[in-house]
Amino acid sequence: MGSMEEAFRSLNTAGNSPKKEIYPHPVFARSSDYRIGMLELGLRGFLGMIFVVSGALKVWSPVQFQQDILQYQLLPYMATALLAVYLPWLEILCGIALLVRKYYRGALAILSVLMGVFLLAYLQALWRGIQLQCGCFGELFRQTPPWVVVVRNLFFLECLTVLWFLLLIRSPSKKV
Amino acid sequence: MCGIYATVMSWKNAQIKSPLRFCSDSDNYPGLTVHAWFLILCREAGILLVVALLPTLLWAVVTPSPVRWSPHTLLPGEVQLDELLKSQEQILWIDARSEEEYLQGHIPGAVLLNEERWEALFVELMKSGKWEPGKKVVVYCSSLSCQSSHLVAERLRKQSGIPNVFVLKGGWEAWKKHFGR
């Protein structure tokens, strides 16, 4: 917001009309940082809340989550039990890391891997003709059609990809 | 898609031309090599993976509904086939699989009742008179990992008020294994 105030101040002192095109302004051009920052903030908040909530819902029903993992018919029984207790807490922790922007890179990496692996597992289950429910949000939204699950998870993956991209291109101006 | 467009437009307007050129920022500071950046990423991910173990271990102990660590553990409402056959009581078998699977083979005397055609099949079941008070109702689906039997059993308990509704552990696979089919 400081850069925007400076921009308007410089406009007034220069006697420029407010309607004059001020872009690219030497200070205002840095509003790309502001836009990048707001975009990142929005995406982090959205994804962070999604993962915290979905993890919390799965924490409360570990037996159901274990049954959901068993449906995929990919892992041994003991592995499904371990994942059923561990994955929800990992999800919550990574969601909080996204929200507070601590261990941010690690959280992004873990969530990207989790989403990618889940999507692959879901698609292979559909391809094998296994009738299953996502189990992504515990007891909620269990009757979601498969195409909705795929589109939803592709959307989350896209959001994560955008966050990765924003992480890599942060310009040297002020933080937002 | 809007996010990708906004990102691309922001990138075009930003001072950096290449994503590999790191700039002064808390994430990317001058002198930070790709190798070091990757090491930091691995360190952060490792810390998160390890820290997540703490609440996991605690929750595994205190949770009111613990997971099954062995496939032989019964969930509430589940019964083993051996016990049912030993008890020799009258059972109404409910098949919760699809109609195709039912027609390919089912437990003798089983009635089809699945979620896809619940309304029609439920009415048929109630009208058929196959259930009598005191008769045990056991629902099964294809295998141990199948969820349909639990869903049908739950729905049957709520909708019909029948108290003795159970789920066959292992489903149709357990039956075939027992009778060698």
Image: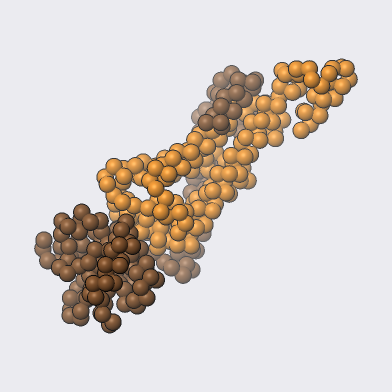
Chain colours: A orange, B brown
Can residue A29 be seen?
yes
What residue is drawn where x is 40% and y is 63%?
Answer: A63
Q: Nearer the viewer, residue A134 or B48?
A: A134
Q: Nearer the viewer, residue B110 or A142?
A: B110
Can residue B43 be seen?
no
Spot occupied by residue A175 in the image (x, y as percentages of width and height): 70, 33
Give the quarter of the figure containing the C terminus of chain B. bottom left
Left or right, A124 with respect to A173, comes to left
Picture quadrant where residue A149 is located:
top left
Spot occupied by residue B131 in the image (x, y as percentages of width and height): 25, 76
Left or right, A161 with respect to B27, comes to left
Q: Nearer the viewer, residue A126 or A80?
A: A126
Spot occupied by residue A40 in the image (x, y as percentages of width and height): 61, 36
Picture quadrant where residue B179 is located:
bottom left
Vertical order, A47 against B22 (above or below): below
Q: Nearer the viewer, residue B125 or B3?
A: B125
Direction left: furthest residue: B180
Left or right, B137 with respect to A27, comes to left
Vertical order, B102 against A117 (above or below): below
What residue is drawn where x is 20% and y is 55%?
Answer: B101
Vertical order, B136 against B108 (above or below): below
What residue is drawn where x is 66% and y is 35%?
Answer: A38
Direction bottom: furthest residue: B134
Picture quadrant where residue B143 is located:
bottom left
Across the whole image, how many numbered discs are drawn on residues?
0
What residue is drawn where x is 22% and y is 66%?
Answer: B111
